[in-house]
Image (tube, grey):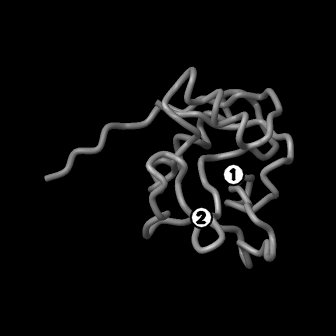
Amino acid sequence: VVLSVPRKYYLVQQGMNWNDAQAYCKAKHTDLAIVESDDNMVHLQYETQRQKFTSSAWIGMYNDVNSWRWSMGNVPLGSFTAWYKGLPDIKGVKKACGVRGNYGWFDVICTQTLPFFCFD
């Protein structure tokens, strides 16, 4: 039996690019948010509602050209995904990163400045 410890998510409404957001999360928490279940999605949604946040924010997901991976441990996404219809769709770039939006995940160039989710 594997027991999963609930994750605590933190929304940081300061805009940063993905790399700077990850460095911030690693310094103050564990890493950028990892979302591996519907339960995790519910907790992220709770944090957005608690802060009355209606925009998009980085999560700990990136494309290493061959596959989408979680930043913590550099592991593949696994069976749970929440991509918005038709995504991911960025092609021909060296690195794209994942964003949690109001209707699911989408892919964005990593140098864009956005708020972000950390977790412990």
Dot 1 crowding, Cα within 10 Å, few <14, some 14–19, many 20+:
many
Residue with the most extreme left position: 1
Q: Amino acid at mark 2?
A: Ala
Q: Which residue is mark 1?
A: 100
Residue 98 percent across, percent down from the top left: 68, 56
For the point 49% across and 31% down, the residue is 30
Q: Where is 27 relative to 95, above or below? A: above
Residue 17 percent across, percent down from the top left: 79, 40
Q: Where is 12 relative to 101, above or below? A: above
For the point 46% across and 30% down, the residue is 120
Name which quarter of the figure residue 68 lies in. bottom right
For the point 81% across and 75% down, the residue is 92
In this image, 56 relative to 25: left or right?
right
Mark 1 vs 2: CB contact within 8 A:
yes
Residue with the most extreme front position: 94
Residue 35 percent across, percent down from the top left: 51, 51
Q: Amino acid at mark 1?
A: Arg
Residue 85 percent across, percent down from the top left: 72, 75
Dot 2 crowding, Cα within 10 Å, few <14, some 14–19, many 20+:
some
Name which quarter of the figure residue 84 lies in. bottom right
Q: Nearer the viewer, residue 68 or 10?
A: 68
In this image, 59 relative to 40: left or right?
right
Look at the numbered disc 1 and give the secondary structure of its residue.
strand
Q: Which residue is mark 2?
A: 82
Look at the numbered disc 2 and give the secondary structure of its residue.
loop
